[in-house]
Image: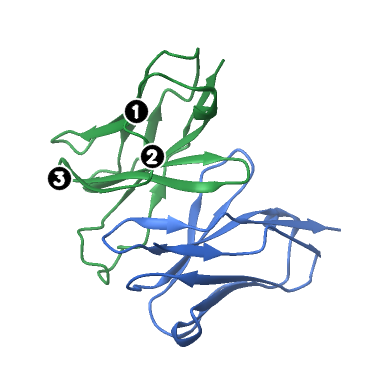
């Protein structure tokens, strides 16, 4: 069974530009979450999508947005890039359905990440 | 809001036992998870405690005490390959999984 695939793996942008990152979840997983990881800050939650609906959103400015398609693939977009947006962006898929105690609700499978450098 | 606190660094030698603690504050609690991340790699799921007590998976065990809002990950017979960052995580109110800032474990020979 293929894992979570994120593209691109590495990218370099300049301030003011925008970027779109893509995530293909494990087949059958309908929940996709996005995280930003920077040194010292751990994994900070961006948003979660389930069945094409944003179910939860972290504390990030509106420049960060995302969407999910009918095949569960997800994209996130960052507009008007700032130097502080340089980070590893991780996508994770799970069998989460919204039932917190359901099996697999807390098991996220992460992709390798997209490392964004903003110059 | 929700927060999970864990030590930033832990060091140990091969063969030793190390415990990584995690204290949490959540509005609604549905269990504590642990993830491992090697340098340059993706976080991988280690264990989940939905109920109080100890869960054992090989050399790794995880413990939860909901009355104390506390859990820990116990790593036994440490090996060099266990050098990594370890994250505790819990769902916030709603459905998203929130992570602590991570504990970097360095195992030396």
Mark 1 on the same chain as mark 3: yes
Give the chain of mark 2. A
Q: Nearer the viewer, mark 1 or mark 3?
A: 1
- The structure residue drawn at horizontal position 73% and vertical position 66%, both measured from the top left corner, is B78
Residue B86, percent across and down?
59, 58
User: Which residue has dot 2 on it?
Assistant: A60
Quick one: which chain is green?
A: A
Vertical placement of residue B58 versus B68, above or below: above
Q: Is mark 3 on a helix, strand or loop?
A: loop
Q: Position of residue B72 (x, y in %)?
A: 58, 74
Query: In the image shown, does B94 or A72 lie closer to the viewer?
Result: B94
Disc 3, disc 2: CB below 8 Å? Answer: no
**Element on which disc 1 rests:** loop
Mark closer to the chain start, 1 or 3: 3
Whole-angstrom CA distance, mark 1 to mark 3, is 23 Å
**Residue ID at (28%, 59%):** B95
* Chain identifier, colour blue: B
**Secondary structure beneath label 2:** loop
Task: Find residue A63 and name its label.
Answer: 1
Q: Residue under label 3, please give it.
A: A51
List the single residue furthest toward the right. B109
CB-based contact (under 8 Å), mark 1 and mark 2: yes
The chain letter under disc 3 is A
Q: How far apart are marks 1 and 2 (CA)?
A: 8 Å
> Which quarter of the rendering shows the N terminus of chain B?
bottom left
> From this viewpoint, is residue A51 visible?
yes
């Amino acid at each position: 069974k293929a894992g979570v695939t994120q593209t691109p793996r590495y990218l370099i942008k300049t301030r003011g530009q925008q970027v779109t990152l893509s995530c293909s979840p494990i087949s059958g997983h309908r929940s996709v979450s996005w995280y930003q990881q920077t040194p010292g800050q751990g994994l900070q939650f961006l948003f979660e999508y389930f069945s094409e609906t944003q179910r939860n959103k972290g504390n990030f400015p509106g420049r960060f947005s995302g969407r999910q398609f009918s095949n569960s693939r997800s994209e996130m977009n960052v507009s008007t890039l700032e130097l502080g947006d340089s980070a590893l962006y991780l996508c994770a898929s799970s069998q989460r359905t919204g039932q917190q105690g359901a099996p697999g609700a807390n098991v996220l499978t992460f992709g390798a990440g997209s490392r964004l450098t903003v110059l | 809001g929700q927060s999970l606190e864990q030590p930033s660094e832990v060091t140990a030698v091969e063969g030793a036992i190390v415990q990584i603690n995690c204290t949490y504050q959540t509005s609604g609690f549905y269990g504590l998870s642990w993830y491992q991340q090697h340098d340059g790699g993706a976080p991988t799921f280690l264990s989940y405690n939905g109920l109080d007590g100890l869960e054992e998976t090989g050399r790794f065990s995880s413990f939860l005490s909901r009355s104390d809002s506390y859990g820990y990950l116990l790593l036994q017979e440490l090996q060099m390959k266990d050098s990594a960052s370890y994250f505790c995580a819990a769902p916030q109110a709603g459905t998203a999984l929130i992570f602590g800032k991570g504990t970097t474990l360095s195992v030396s020979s």
